[in-house]
Image (cartoon, rainbow, N blue to C red):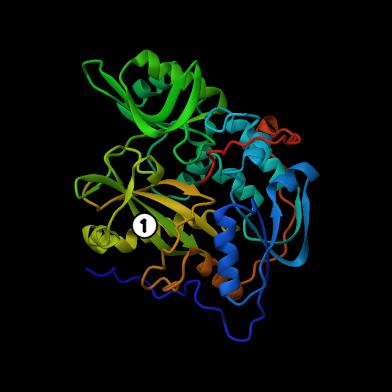
Amino acid sequence: MGQAPRRPEPGPGLPCPGLPGPRFAVVGNPENRRVELFTAAVREAGLPAPRVVPWLDVLRDGGAAFGADEVVRLESPGENADVDLALRAMDDPTRVEGSARWYGRFMASVRTLSGGRRLDDPDELGVLFDKRLCHDVLTRAGVPVPPSPTSGAQAAVRGWDDVRALMREHRMPRLFVKLAHGSSASGVLAVETAGSGRIRATTSVEMSGGRLHNSLRVRRYRDEREIAAIVDGLAPDGLHVERWMPKASLHARVADLRIVVTGGRATHAVVRTSKSPLTNLHLGGARGELAAAIEAAGARWGEALDICERAAACFPGTLCVGVDLLPAIGWQRFAVGEVNAFGDLLPRLTGLPGSGAEGLDTYAAQIAAVRRRPPAPATPPRASSARHRAVSAAPPRSPNHPARNHHAHA
């Protein structure tokens, strides 16, 4: 079954003939495949290779400046040991702790960038990397999201006792506990209880010697004391709690979608399936059949894409976001789980039919969108809130360390 018809609005499209090509600059880790893939896409578009400004230089030098004609793209600072050490102050890249410090220092470093034409608004990044603030923005815009008592950071979660209290108060026998500033399922627990007092938490967190580590193996804890110890260890970095909404399935596996929205249009989609509540590909999830998901959604497929576009519209200063869309059982209702600032790493995936990005991967679609509608010159970011200043800290110099970091995706 083909894709449901959608309204005939222009997508990113191909570059208009006669328009001069932009001059790109990228802030990223030069050795990272994200930077390599974007550089290759720029060259394939017939444009000069982008100027690459390493995150490590930004952190060490206290900023970077860009020319008025440079279109500046921010890439994830993940997967670089020195950058991770500077942002989290953790010498073990598998450690889960330190995400609040990472957030404060990352946002402080973003605000040291000056000039250029930005594809990533600094103030919007601050919201995208705080699940509590992002949930509140989406809720206020009428975007369907799982109910959450921590939306807008209203309810403080100081540990497991608070989580238990929220479960009782809001009648949530099944819920997700997430790090407010986490990524790639780091620190996520899918918690479910039964009337008999039984409890189970599914997570990639491994506790060893009183420390929390990310693992590539999904674990299930059934001892409430162990679950409480993990949540208590995560709580100082800030926690977000959401009702667990049962998801639809494909071929007997739970399923959700990553929808990339470029220039306001849903351009790319991938289905993620898993035998566990965590569908992340690095945790054993697998790509599902998009055609099967579209067929299951039927006439609701267009509505699913519209929801993702509405979520992206909450961040008009950010060219591209990856929306995690949660289909309910039956594929007739949808909710937005998260909106990711760096959610476009989907190599070799080409655009959806009718999106205006047919035949283009996620990077080529963004380049085409910029050529059609170049961003305006950057303006200074708004003053940081008191809450943001409280978690911010000046990034220290970063000593060398051979480890790799887990903050690969938003």
Would you name the residue on which mark 1 appears? 270
Q: Is residue 93 visible?
A: yes
Q: Is residue 319 visible?
A: no
- Other-residue count near label 1 (Cα within 10 Å), few / some / many at <14 / 14–19 / ≥20: some
Give the amino acid at mark 1.
Val
Residue at 57%, 44% (x, y): give it.
79
Q: Quadrant of residue 81?
A: top right
| Residue 31 rendering spot, x and y as whole percentages | 61, 52
Q: Determine whether 38 is above or below 146 in the image.
A: below
Position of the N terminus by quadrant? bottom left
Q: Quadrant of residue 205?
A: top left
| Residue 16 rendering spot, x and y as whole percentages | 57, 82
Name, please, the residue furthest toward the front. 402
Q: Determine whether 87 is above or below 250 in the image.
A: above
Identify the secondary structure beneath mark 1: strand
Residue at 44%, 38% (x, y): give it.
185
Name, please, the residue furthest toward the top. 225
| Residue 243 rendering spot, x and y as whole percentages | 35, 34
Q: Determine whether 366 is above or below 410 in the image.
A: below
